[in-house]
Image (cartoon, helix red, strand yellow):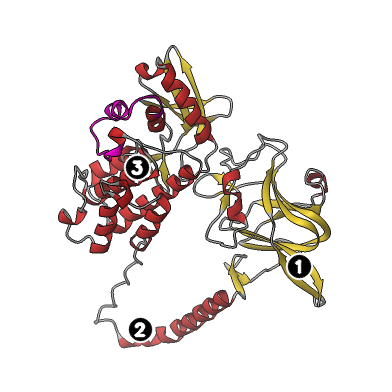
Amino acid sequence: MVWRGTDRVLRRPVSVKLLRPELGSDPAFTRSLREQVRRVASLPEPPLVRLLDTGEQDGVVFLVREHVEGVSARAILDRDGPRPIPEAASIAHRVLEGLAAAHAAGVLHLDLEPGDVLLTADGEVRLTDLGIGAALHGSRTPAEAAGLLGARDLPPEQRRGPVDRRTDVFAVGALLFELLTVEPPRGRSSPRTLRPEIPRALDRVVARALAPAPSERFPDATSFAAALEPFSRVPSAPRPPAAPPHRERWVRTWLVAPALVLVLAAAAIAVGLWLGRLEVGGPLGIRPANDPTPAGPSVRSPDTTLVEVEPVRVSVLDPFGDGREHDANLGLAVDGDEVTVWRSENYFDGRLNKPGVGLVLDLGRTVEVAGVRLSTPHPGFAVALAVGDDPRALVDGAGEPIVTTARTERVLAGSGRYVLVWITSVVPTGSGNRAVIAELEVLGAGRA
């Protein structure tokens, strides 16, 4: 049973899940659940719904989690029927991304069904109820745990053990089968037998995920997600219909010149973006790449050679908070891939409510630093920068905050082993109020 509630201290909506009373009276289950809760609380999100608190009152165990305004995949299937193929594959792909992060932290779901997948109005997919199924398996025999989970489609090993990440792979295969056909697998592995327009290649992917033997499935969530990638791309919008043939020729002729200008301008912008000479941003929507106006002076100078300095480690500096800030995903901010991103925690009211939180880049040695580059898909949050040999002392030495753009390049002249990126505000991102960093680069100074 899930209730919507209000956190009266932080003034935010929450969801409160009440577990069965017979589970609350079982010491083995409550011990197992506490262990799972500790692991789940440290997981990154999204697409995982954040766990905020847990407790027990009058023998009833409850979990408090972030409230997500959305509709479950179960409700959508009941209301609208099978989902379009790209949408179904995209939902499963996003669920697998969340499971991959959970598995990396040693957390299995083991109770995944369409009701645990929430879809928000802005297109986000969120996965909830991590830890409960694993707590059941940690406190009971596999057969007893499977009995409590009900007569749903469970992989064979979940009834006799042992379970591992491939057990969750099977569950996502069952989820995808149902998204495509609105029917649970019930021993079937080919959704194409119910829906012939499903591509054979996608049918093979689903069948592999639903293989009875774990050794025949995808070995993990990441490899399953990679196999779904080609099918989860939403096709481009259809072209508008051609103009009716009865339109006068002079109208089409009058439109040729401005249309040609627009086509040439669009081509020039596309080439500029491709060559890196232009970027999205600025008052007109497009500006020269590394435009220094919103974020301070450029790092470049005629007599300086810039060399990227790869950090040996990145860590969180949170002296005014709980000391953590999605630590498990910090490496995504410096992995050289702008597609992967590090996200801060979700600050529900849009304010940090503390002076700041920082990422510390350990360069491994003292370096003469010239500047920092920062890329983000959600510009507008503010950061200050500092360089030196004592990470904690850098907070006091950080300069004036600057407002980030999609690609910010900022002078940071000085030497030291550590570079601090001190975040002082967050922005709405569609999945909460956060700072999101796709890539951080430290630029060392040399002479031309």
Q: Nearer the viewer, residue 356 or 241?
A: 356
As measured in the structure, the alpha-carbon distance from the residue carrying label 3 to the one carrying label 1 is 50 Å
Q: Residues within 10 Å of mark 3 (few under 14, many from 20)?
A: many
- Dot 3 falls on a residue whose secondary structure is helix
Tell me which numbered mark, 1 or 2, is placed earlier along the sequence: 2
Looking at the rendering, which quadrant does residue 139 occupy? top left
Task: Look at the image and give the residue range highlighted in magenta.
Answer: 138-157
Residue 425 placed where, x, y %? 66, 46
Q: Nearer the viewer, mark 1 or mark 2?
A: 1
How far apart are the alpha carbons under marks 1 and 2?
Answer: 51 Å
In magenta segment, residue 309: no
Residue highlighted by disc 1: 299
Q: Mark 3 touching mark 1, by CB under 8 A? A: no
Residue 333 drawn above or below residue 61: below
Q: Amino acid at mark 1?
A: Val
Q: Residue at x 55, y 29 (%)?
A: 11
Disc 3 marks which amino acid?
Answer: Thr
